Image: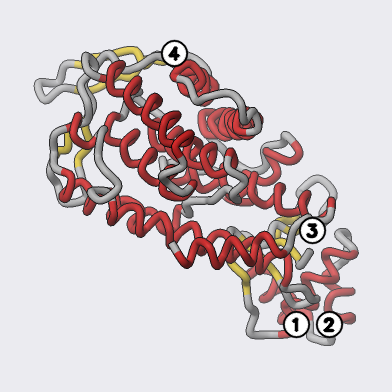
C-alpha cells in the first residue's frame, strides 16, 4: 500500500483547503460522480445536461423523464450518504442501505418482459426492499452468473454489515482495502433487484469519506476495466454466491489492485485540479484537456469572462477570421465543452477552468 501512503501524503500536504478550493472540488465531484455512476448503468443525460440539472435544477435539450428523475435522486442519495459518513459514532446498518436504495429508486415500479412464446410477464421492483426474485447477469463473455438467492440475502447482508463494523473497529484493513472488499462482497450478494451498482459505488465512498479519505469516481469510460476486474476476481473466488459474499482479502486481490490504482488516479486528479493553474488549464470529467491551438483557450477564456460575447468580437479579440471561429465553436460544442443557451444566446462553459 506504499502508493496509497504516498498519494495521501501529497493530499494531506494540501490541507486545509481554502473555502473556494473546497467548493470547486465539491462541485466537480458532485457532477462527476452522479454523471459517471448513472452513465455506467445506461443513463443518457450528457455531462453538460447533468451539470445544469444538478446545479440549477433545469433540463436543457431532449431528455428522458426517467433519466432526469434518476439523476436527481442520485444526487439526493449522494448527499444522504455524505451526511451519514460524517456520523463517526454511528455504525453502518442494513436500514441505512435499504433507505439509500429507496432514495435512489424513489418508488416501486413494474417491469414487463416478453417471453419466447410471445406472452408478456411482469413483476414489481420494490424500492428499499431486498429482492424477492433470483437475479443474475450475462457476463461480457456470454455466460450467466448467479447472485445470492432471495432466501439467503438477508443473512448475507447481516454478515456483510457486521463484518464491516467489526473490521472497522479492529483496524486490520486500510480504508481503501475496506472499501474494495466491501464493494466486491456486496456485488456478489446483489441484494436488490435494481440499483446494486450505484449503491455499491456510494457505499465504497461512504467508507472512504468516513475515514477522512477523498471520495472517488468510477469513470464510465473505464467501465470495461471495472467490470473486467470484478469478473477476474469472480473466477478466483468461484461461482458460489455465499463464498463471494465472504471472500477474503487475498481472494479479491485482483479487484483490490484495480480499486487501489483507481483511487490513486482519482486523488492525483484532485491534486492536479487544485495545483495546476493558468489561463490554458482546463478540466472535463476527470481529465485535463489540452488544446493544439492557443486560439481555443483564448476563445474559452473570453467566453468565461463575457458569456454574451458575439462571434464577431471573438474573431476580433482572438485575431482569426469568422470561419475559423465557427470551426472552433463547432468542435467545442461537439465535444460537450460548451453550450449555447437558446433563450438569450449566451455561452455556457461546461469545461472547467483552473481554480
Q: What residue does disc 4 label?
A: 108
Q: In this view, does 245 lie to the left or right of 86?
A: left
Q: SS for tag 4? A: loop
Q: What residue does disc 2 label?
A: 318
- Name the residue at the left extreme: 117
**Number of the front mark, 2 or 4:** 4
Rendered image coloring scheme: secondary structure
Q: Is residue 15 above or below residue 3?
A: above
Q: Distance between the residues labelled 1 and 2?
A: 6 Å
Which quarter of the image is occupied by the N terminus?
A: bottom left
Q: Distance between the residues labelled 3 and 1?
A: 17 Å
Count of marks placed on residues: 4
Q: Going 76% across and 38% down the picture, which residue do you hit?
A: 56
Q: In this view, does 204 lie above or below 322?
A: above
Q: How far apart are marks 2 and 4 (CA)?
A: 54 Å
Q: SS for tag 2? A: helix
Asked if the residue under mark 2 is in contact with the one under mark 3, i.e. CB atoms within 8 Å, the reply is no
Of callouts 1 and 2, the N-terminal one: 1
Q: How far apart are marks 4 and 3 (CA)?
A: 40 Å
Q: What residue does disc 3 label?
A: 347
Residue 302 image point, x, y percent: 85, 70
**Number of the front mark, 1 or 4:** 4
Q: In this view, does 272 lie above or below 296?
A: above
* Label 4: few (<14), some (14–19) or many (≥20) C-alpha neighbours in 10 Å: few
Asked if the residue under mark 2 is in contact with the one under mark 1, i.e. CB atoms within 8 Å, the reply is yes
Dot label at residue 295: 1
Of callouts 3 and 1, the N-terminal one: 1
Amino acid at each position: 500500500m506504499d502508493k496509497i501512503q504516498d498519494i495521501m501524503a501529497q493530499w494531506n500536504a494540501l490541507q486545509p483547503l481554502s473555502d473556494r478550493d473546497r467548493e470547486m472540488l465539491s462541485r466537480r465531484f458532485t457532477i462527476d460522480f452522479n454523471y459517471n455512476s448513472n452513465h455506467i448503468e445506461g443513463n443518457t443525460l450528457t455531462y453538460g445536461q447533468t451539470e445544469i440539472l444538478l446545479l440549477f435544477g433545469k433540463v436543457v435539450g431532449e431528455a428522458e423523464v426517467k433519466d432526469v428523475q434518476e439523476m436527481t435522486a442520485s444526487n439526493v442519495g449522494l448527499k444522504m450518504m455524505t451526511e451519514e459518513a460524517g456520523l463517526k459514532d454511528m455504525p453502518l446498518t442494513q436500514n441505512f442501505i435499504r433507505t439509500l436504495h429507496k432514495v435512489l429508486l424513489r418508488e416501486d415500479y413494474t417491469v414487463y418482459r416478453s417471453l419466447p412464446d410471445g406472452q408478456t410477464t411482469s413483476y414489481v421492483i420494490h424500492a428499499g426492499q431486498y429482492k424477492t426474485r433470483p437475479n443474475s447477469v450475462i457476463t461480457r463473455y456470454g455466460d450467466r452468473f448467479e447472485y445470492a438467492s432471495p432466501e439467503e440475502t438477508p443473512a448475507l447482508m447481516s454478515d456483510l454489515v457486521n463484518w464491516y463494523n467489526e473490521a472497522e473497529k479492529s483496524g486490520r484493513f486500510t480504508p481503501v482495502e475496506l472499501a474494495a472488499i466491501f464493494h466486491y462482497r456486496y456485488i456478489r450478494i446483489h441484494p436488490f433487484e435494481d440499483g446494486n451498482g450505484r449503491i455499491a459505488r456510494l457505499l465504497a465512498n461512504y467508507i472512504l469519506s468516513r475515514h477522512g479519505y477523498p471520495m472517488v469516481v468510477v469513470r464510465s469510460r473505464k467501465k470495461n476495466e471495472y467490470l473486467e476486474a470484478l469478473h477476474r476476481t469472480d473466477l478466483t473466488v468461484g461461482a458460489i454466491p455465499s463464498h463471494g459474499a465472504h471472500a477474503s482479502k487475498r481472494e479479491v486481490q485482483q479487484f483490490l489492485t484495480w480499486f487501489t490504482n483507481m483511487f490513486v488516479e482519482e486523488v492525483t486528479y484532485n491534486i492536479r485540479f487544485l495545483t495546476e493553474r493558468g489561463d490554458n488549464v482546463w478540466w472535463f470529467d476527470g481529465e485535463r484537456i489540452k488544446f493544439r491551438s492557443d486560439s481555443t483557450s483564448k476563445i474559452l477564456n473570453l467566453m468565461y469572462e463575457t458569456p454574451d460575447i458575439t462571434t464577431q468580437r471573438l474573431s476580433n479579440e482572438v485575431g482569426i477570421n469568422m470561419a475559423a471561429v465557427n470551426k472552433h465553436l463547432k468542435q467545442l460544442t461537439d465535444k460537450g465543452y460548451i453550450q449555447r443557451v437558446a433563450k438569450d444566446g449566451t455561452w455556457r462553459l461546461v469545461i472547467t477552468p483552473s481554480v
